[in-house]
Structures are given as structure tokens and as C-alpha cells.
Image (spheres, rainbow, N blue to C red):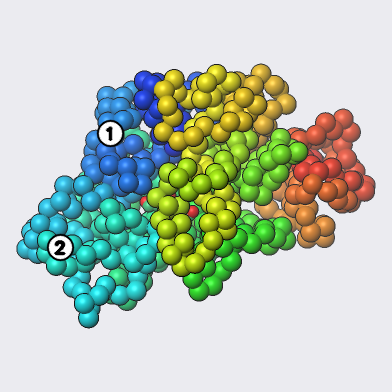
């Protein structure tokens, strides 16, 4: 495979609203990101995936865009954006823009026109249908609860929205829509961005009348067309958000010979702690099985081969915090946060760190639905209450899975509001900011931050981490996730005990050295090794 910069990179995701406020309005802003670039340079990341900063009425915190070529007033101005690009470049950091083109905001000029009349030139930019027997056109549902069809009085037709009713779906079958999107992408490419993260890109090939949403028949045709019209031939990174991807599907997107995307986010492991089946979704909780986690992640590690590339992540702005979700955020917070870092960053693929993950930030439990900000959470609560679910069971689901968990403000130091704002934060700050913050992580050489920093440096210094073969050790106890990376006569053994209980494994030979560990490890472990709670380490064998 031709080597590209993004094969060897680590990406850091910023959710701007919650990162750093500089003007006291309680909302993070572009100047706040600029102010923290030195921190990110110190961590060692290569690129920032910036969640949307475009003009938006914020029905879904920026994922509802009303102008793709302007900046949300709360975040700053286009001049601030240009400065962010320049300041990041000075530090060798690329900016990956969030491309949200499955839908726009209902306040986008295209939709404002589209809804005016059936013969408006913009009508066909969106997906309009007549009622069927006086009701919605068909059974398509919105990810944010309820039907995906909204009736518009003005013209007496329904429009499609796979997310909120203020996020009408664009009609990708319309050639003009596609050209407008490509023009907009080129506007940002000309500004010098490093690439795009493509929001729910697997939905753009939908066939609404057949109730096909993900992986539609023309999806890959559109992506090849987009590649040619925009980033193809330029040294940019692209990552598609694809909830429905299997390894075979991931290859369709990311096989370099097909000229589509660099890589995709697959979500198979993300669904392991939920019930599946008719009417079930992420809110229907089920405990994680570690053997299944090993199976799924190992499958993805080995099956792409040279026909694709993995994205590695535990967290993003839609998911609960990993240390609270599958780790232990009380007695073993530090150990388990470091364990998940080591486990993921030693795998093959491009790792993504979500803001605050590098200091072990935790979920924020609520006790009342009035504390929720997120539209997905609020709509789900309303719908399920009317279906007879109890308040208590829904609050439990929200605390386990709600998106606000990831969105509480970044915890910088022990000053008021964790140093995020001098004003009133838009969303509650986790009160544990006095213990969990960047300042004390920087001061402690054994902190979670320093584990991440070291892992990033290891990837830079060792081709094995980037290119080595992956091999799961399958004769370990259920809760022990152990694998090898093999490259040019060198082998690294990665061991992670995902449990608060001890487990024993056998390390057959004596390695040369401990590469990284989350407990003190003066000797290189060999023979029968008792693993402590959430212990993780990497041992190097062969030439170092
Ligand atoms: O997410 C797609 C998506 O399907 C999520 O809403 C997901 O189902 C849910 O949050 C799982 O927890 C993308 C963005 O990442 C998300 O923030 C947006 O709300 C959504 O698209 C619409 O743009
Ligand atoms: Ca602000």
C-alpha cells in the first residue's frame, strides 16, 4: 500500500462548543482552540477533527448547517478560522473538517426556497412526497425518534428527515445538489484544510421509496464522483462515518484502488453492549462480553489487509466515556483509562482521541430529564415514556449511553468551571474537575495524559506500530485481551486485563524490554504472570 501521512497519524477530535471559552459566554470558541494548540502539540497529535463550526441554529449542536461557507457566530468569524488554520499549520497540525451533507438545517437558504412552492427551482434539492392514505408516505423512522416524514402545510407534502425535523435530507439523486456540495468542499480545500470527516455518509445513497437508507445502490458511485471532483489527487485524509459497515463494505470505501475514502469509522464494537432486534437500539442495555470485543476488533484488524485501513476509537461526541462505559471510573479510573489507551493505540490503523479522553474524563450522571441538553436523548425520553417505559429505567439508559456524557466541558484546571469558562457553561461541568483536569495531568509524569503522549510517540518511532501484522492470542482467560504485532523480525506482545479481578497468563519467553505499562514494572514479566486489576503492558521481543 502506498504510504500516506494519515497512516502514521493520530487524530484528536474537538467538540468546539465544549473545548475552551474565551469570551465568557459559556460556549467554547475558535479562539479557545487556538489558545490550546500548544497543549495539543505537546500531546503530539497530527490532526484535529473539528466537529462542525459552520453557521447553524443549533438544533443538533452544529450538525444542522444553515451556511457551509460561514462560521457560527458563537464560535467566531471566518478570520478566526483562517487564523486557526495558520496557527495549526505552524505546529504541524492539520484541520479535518466535519462534512455534514446528508442533510442541512431547515434554515439553510436551499431549504427556505425549497419549501416555498412545488415548482421552486430548489424544490428537488430535498425529498418531498405526497401523503399516502392521509398519512406519512411510509414507515421510515428518524434516528431521533418518531417518523422520518414531516408534513409541511405550505405545499401540503411531506419532507424526509432521517434526524431531527429541523435537519431535512438532501436529495443526492439531484445532480445539481451534488455539484453544489463539491463546490463547497473545494472552498474549504482551497483554504488549506487537511481533509474531511464525513457525517453519516453511508446514508447519501438512500432510496426512500423502498425504505433503503444505509448502503444504497448509488452510494459508491457518488463517492467516486466526489473524490474526482474534490480531494482526489490531493494529499488529504477522508474518513466516513459508516454505522452499517462490515469489513467487506469498509473495503469498498477504503481500498485505494477504488478512489473513494482513506478510511471509515466502523461501529460494530460500539453495539456490543446493547440488545439487538426489532425495536431495540442503543438504549436497550446489555453488559459487554469481553470475548465478543476481542472477536470483533480482531476481525477488523485482520480482514482489511491491503484493501483498506482501520480507524481506531473508543470515544466521540456521540458516545459515553470509555472509562465509565467499559472501564472502572471509581477505584481503577487511572488504570482502566490507561489500559484502554494501550489496547487501542497498539493496534493497526489511525487512532482517534476524543477531547478529555487523554485525561480520563468520566460520564456525568443526571437524575432528572430536565438536565439533558441533547436532542436525541430528549426525543427518546418523550417517545419511550409514552410507550410505557418508566422514568427510572430511561434515566439509567441515558446515564449509560446519552450523548451529553461526552459533551460536558473540557476540564483544564481546578479553577471555577474547570477553567472552561468564566461565565455560565452551556452544559454542566462535571464536578470531578478538581481531581480530573489537564493541569494536574501535565504535572504528573505517570498520568493518563503521559500514557497517551508516550503511545503517540511510540507510533512515530516504530514502524511496527503502523505496519506490523496483528495476531490475537486466543488461549487467554476471557477477560484478558492479548495480541501480537509482528514486523521485520520484531514482535511486540500487548496484554490487557479488562477486569477488576486478577487473571493469570503465561508469557512463554523472556522479552527484551517493557515498552509501556500502566503499573510499575521493574522486571520484564515472563512465565506465569498474575495480572493486577486493569493491568496492561507491552513487551518487546527480538531486535529492538
Ligand atoms: O451521527 C450519526 C448517528 O447516527 C448518531 O446520531 C447516532 O445514531 C447516535 O448518536 C448514536 O449514539 C452523526 C453525528 O456524529 C451526530 O452528532 C449527529 O447528530 C448526526 O450524525 C446527525 O448529523
Ligand atoms: Ca465563547
Residue at 71%, 35% in the rendered image: 334
Residue at 22%, 81% in the rendered image: 133
Q: Which residue is mark 1?
A: 71
Residue 114 is left or right of residue 402, and the answer is: left
| Residue 203 percent across, percent down from the top left | 36, 61
Instruction: Label 1: state its secondary structure.
Output: strand
Q: Which mark is residue 235?
A: none
| Residue 445 percent across, percent down from the top left | 71, 22
Comes first in the chain, label 2 or label 1: 1
Q: Which residue is mark 2?
A: 153
Residue 275 is left or right of residue 82, and the answer is: right
Residue at 29%, 38% in the rendered image: 54
Residue 445 is left or right of residue 163, and the answer is: right
Is 518 situated above or below 280? above
| Residue 417 percent across, percent down from the top left | 51, 25
Q: Residues within 10 Å of mark 1 (few under 14, many from 20)?
A: many
Quick one: 199 or 118, which is closer to the camera?
118
Q: Is residue 217 visible?
A: no
Amino acid at each position: 500500500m502506498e504510504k500516506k501521512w494519515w497512516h502514521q497519524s493520530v487524530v484528536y477530535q474537538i467538540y468546539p462548543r465544549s473545548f475552551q471559552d474565551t469570551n465568557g459566554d459559556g460556549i467554547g470558541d475558535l479562539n479557545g482552540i487556538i489558545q490550546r494548540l500548544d497543549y495539543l502539540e505537546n500531546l503530539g497529535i497530527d490532526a484535529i477533527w473539528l466537529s462542525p463550526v459552520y453557521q447553524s441554529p443549533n438544533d443538533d449542536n452544529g450538525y444542522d448547517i444553515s451556511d457551509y461557507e460561514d462560521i457560527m457566530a458563537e464560535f467566531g468569524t471566518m478570520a478566526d478560522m483562517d487564523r486557526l488554520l495558520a496557527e495549526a499549520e505552524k505546529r504541524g497540525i492539520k484541520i479535518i473538517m466535519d462534512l455534514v451533507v446528508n442533510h442541512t438545517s431547515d434554515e439553510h437558504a436551499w431549504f427556505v426556497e425549497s419549501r416555498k412552492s412545488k415548482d421552486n427551482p430548489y424544490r428537488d434539492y430535498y425529498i418531498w412526497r405526497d401523503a399516502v392514505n392521509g398519512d406519512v408516505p411510509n414507515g421510515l423512522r428518524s434516528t431521533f425518534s418518531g417518523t422520518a416524514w414531516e408534513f409541511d402545510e405550505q405545499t401540503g407534502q411531506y419532507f424526509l428527515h432521517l434526524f431531527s425535523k429541523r435537519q431535512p435530507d438532501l436529495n443526492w439523486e439531484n445532480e445539481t445538489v451534488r455539484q453544489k456540495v463539491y463546490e463547497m468542499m473545494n472552498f474549504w480545500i482551497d483554504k488549506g484544510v487537511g481533509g474531511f470527516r464525513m457525517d453519516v455518509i453511508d446514508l447519501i445513497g438512500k432510496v426512500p421509496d423502498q425504505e433503503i437508507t444505509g448502503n444504497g445502490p448509488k452510494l459508491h458511485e457518488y463517492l467516486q464522483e466526489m473524490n474526482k471532483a474534490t480531494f482526489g489527487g490531493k494529499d488529504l485524509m477522508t474518513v466516513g462515518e459508516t454505522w452499517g459497515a462490515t469489513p467487506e463494505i469498509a473495503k469498498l470505501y477504503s481500498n485505494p484502488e477504488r478512489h473513494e475514502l482513506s478510511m471509515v469509522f466502523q461501529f460494530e464494537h460500539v453495539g456490543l453492549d446493547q440488545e439487538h432486534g426489532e425495536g431495540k437500539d442503543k438504549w436497550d442495555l446489555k453488559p459487554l462480553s469481553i470475548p465478543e470485543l476481542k472477536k470483533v476488533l480482531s476481525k477488523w484488524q485482520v480482514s482489511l489487509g491491503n484493501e483498506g485501513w482501520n480507524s481506531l476509537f473508543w470515544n466521540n461526541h456521540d458516545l459515553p466515556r470509555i472509562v465509565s462505559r467499559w472501564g472502572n471510573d471509581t477505584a481503577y479510573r487511572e488504570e482502566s483509562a490507561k489500559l484502554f489507551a494501550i489496547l487501542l493505540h497498539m493496534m493497526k490503523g489511525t487512532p482517534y482521541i476524543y477531547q478529555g479522553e487523554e485525561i480520563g474524563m468520566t460520564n456525568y450522571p443526571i437524575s432528572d430529564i430536565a438536565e439533558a441538553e441533547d436532542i436525541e436523548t430528549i426525543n427518546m425520553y418523550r417517545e419511550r415514556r409514552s410507550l410505557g417505559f418508566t422514568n427510572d429505567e430511561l434515566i439509567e439508559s441515558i446515564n449509560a449511553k446519552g450523548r451529553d456524557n461526552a459533551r460536558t466541558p473540557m476540564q483544564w484546571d481546578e479553577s471555577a468551571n474547570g477553567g472552561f469558562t468564566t461565565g455560565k457553561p452551556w452544559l454542566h461541568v462535571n464536578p470531578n474537575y478538581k481531581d480530573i483536569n489537564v493541569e494536574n495531568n501535565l504535572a504528573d509524569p505517570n498520568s493518563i495524559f503521559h500514557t497517551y503522549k508516550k503511545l503517540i510517540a511510540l507510533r512515530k518511532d516504530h514502524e511496527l506500530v503502523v505496519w506490523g501484522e496483528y495476531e490475537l492470542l486466543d488461549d487467554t482467560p476471557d477477560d484478558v485481551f492479548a495480541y501480537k504485532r509482528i514486523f521485520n523480525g520484531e514482535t511486540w506482545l500487548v496484554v490487557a486485563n479488562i477486569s477488576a479481578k486478577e487473571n493469570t497468563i503465561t508469557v512463554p519467553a523472556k522479552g527484551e524490554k517493557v515498552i509501556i505499562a500502566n503499573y510499575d514494572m521493574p522486571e520484564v514479566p515472563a512465565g506465569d504472570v498474575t495480572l493486577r486489576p486493569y493491568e496492561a503492558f507491552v513487551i518487546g521481543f527480538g531486535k529492538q
